[in-house]
Amino acid sequence: MKNNLLYHFSDIHLKSIERHLGAYLKDKRPERLHKLRIDIKKIRSVFHFVEKTNKKKYPDNVLNPVFQNVGKLRELQIGIRLLNKLSHPPQKLITRLKKKEDVLKKQLIKLIPYYSKTVKSFRKEVILPSKFPNKKKTKTFFKKAITSADKILLNNDRRSVHHFRMKIKKIMYVYNILPHKLHKEIKLNTSEITKLQSKIGKWHDHYSALNFLRRQHFSGQISKYIAILKEKENRQFFSLIIDLQTMGGISKR
């Protein structure tokens, strides 16, 4: 069983999580956290695929604590980065946020030995199907996933675009591990999805940063900086909506 494609994929990304945790202890580089979260998203997506095609639960909730705690720090770091890009960065606010960042870093560093041990144990205990789902089950999974994603685009609001973003990420993570002979069987507009991924990601950074800043208890003076970020986010969002409407869905026509 441990020689099959599903196990191999899971093993690679769980080991990658362990490496990023260990590396972050040494260099504190934010991209370690970003890559770690991508590893977890990929694992979750594949486990979801296996659950749907095998009608059986394959729990991955042991990864939730590290994903959530790293996410809090990641969200804060994105907010700081975007504020620093303004023509007149609010230094007092950035200093205040950096103090929060230091607190979250220290909390995470204390937990990393525990997280590393937990991930390693989970990796050694992972149980996945001995065979990759057959073509019929795989095609059915993608047909439902693509239809679900396309339906979301009927609503042109931010929450829907955010959900659409999560859907296509999950779809692409699974699509990318399929045997190549199955790629032509799946009617997926991969070229257009690839073009959109970067644009959606940039919009989402601003969207997340705005939501984060709105949850903070800052003075009224900070509202002008939120307004500047909101203006940028608006431009990105409406440009994105036009692209999504033009695309008309992620399935091939």
Image (tube, rainbow, N blue to C red):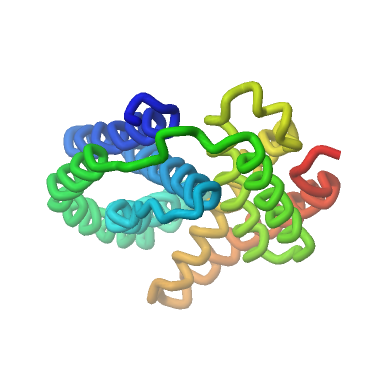
User: Residue at point 60% right, 51% down?
Assistant: 167
Question: Which quadrant of the figure contains the C terminus?
Answer: top right
* Rendering coords of residue 180 (x, y %): 62, 22
Give the camera-side residue of 141 and 193: 141
User: Residue at point 65% right, 51% down?
Assistant: 145
Is 197 rendered above or below residue 105?
above
* Rendering coords of residue 252 (x, y %): 81, 38
User: Residue at point 18% right, 56% down?
Assistant: 107
Question: Which quadrant of the figure contains the N terminus?
Answer: top left
Location of residue 196 (image quadrant) = top right
Q: What is the total number of numbered labels drawn onto the structure image?
A: 0
Residue 79 visible in the snapshot: yes
Is 211 rendered above or below residue 194?
below
User: Residue at point 41% right, 76% down?
Assistant: 219
* Rendering coords of residue 106 (x, y %): 17, 53
* Rendering coords of residue 83 (x, y %): 47, 53
Residue 98 visible in the snapshot: no
Horizontally, residue 184 falls left or right of residue 115, namely right
Location of residue 150 (image quadrant) = bottom right
